[in-house]
């Protein structure tokens, strides 16, 4: 068997310091991952709330249009302003 040369005390200190640094950095990375997960969950929840509110606003706008124009007039307006008029002919 080949024997490894004995390490010098300076090398031991350096390796120990590097090991502590790497361990500390890994700990910081794990904390940042957890923090990122929390932020993602928070923003996903907010996005869902905004989406629900947007849907409700769209429904409210349709209701107000119906009340303003009346159902028949609104249908006539939609028919006149439809984008594909050629399909009806």
Image (cartoon, rainbow, N blue to C red):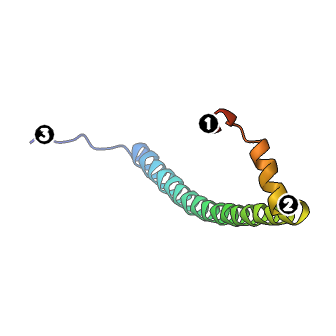
- Could you tell me how far apart the alpha carbons at marks 1 and 2 are, in whole angstroms? 26 Å
- The label nearer to you, 3 versus 1, is 1
Seen from the viewer's position, the closer of residues 75 and 67 is: 75
Callout 3: SS = loop
Tell me whether circle 3 and circle 1 mark residues in contact (CB < 8 Å): no
Q: Tell which residue pokes out farthest to the front in this image.
A: 89
List the residue tagged with mark 1: 87
Quarter of image, res 3? top left
Determine crowd level at label 3: few under 14, some 14-19, many 20+ residues with C-alpha closer than 10 A.
Answer: few
Could you tell me which residue is drawn at 44 percent across and 44 percent down? 10
Q: Which residue is at the far right? A: 68
Q: Nearer the viewer, residue 19 or 73?
A: 73
Q: Is residue 53 above or below residue 18?
A: below
- Label 2, secondary structure: give it: helix
Closer to us: mark 1 or mark 2? Answer: 1
Quick one: SS at disc 1?
Answer: helix
Label located before the other in sequence (3 or 2): 3
Where is residue 66? Give x, y as percent.
Answer: 83, 63
Which residue is drawn at the image coordinates 64% and 35% (left, top)?
89
Which residue lies under the disc numbered 3? 2
Residue 65 is labelled as: 2
Place residue 73 in its image quadrant: bottom right
Q: Is residue 53 left or right of residue 73?
A: left
């Amino acid at each position: 068997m080949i024997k490894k040369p004995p390490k010098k005390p300076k090398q031991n200190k350096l390796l120990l310091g590097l090991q502590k640094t790497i361990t500390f950095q890994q700990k910081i990375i794990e904390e940042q991952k957890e923090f990122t997960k929390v932020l993602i969950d928070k923003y996903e929840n907010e996005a869902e709330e905004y989406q629900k509110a947007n849907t409700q606003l769209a429904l409210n706008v349709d209701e107000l249009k119906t009340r303003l124009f009346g159902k028949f007039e609104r249908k006539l307006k939609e028919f006149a302003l439809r984008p594909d008029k050629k399909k009806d002919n």
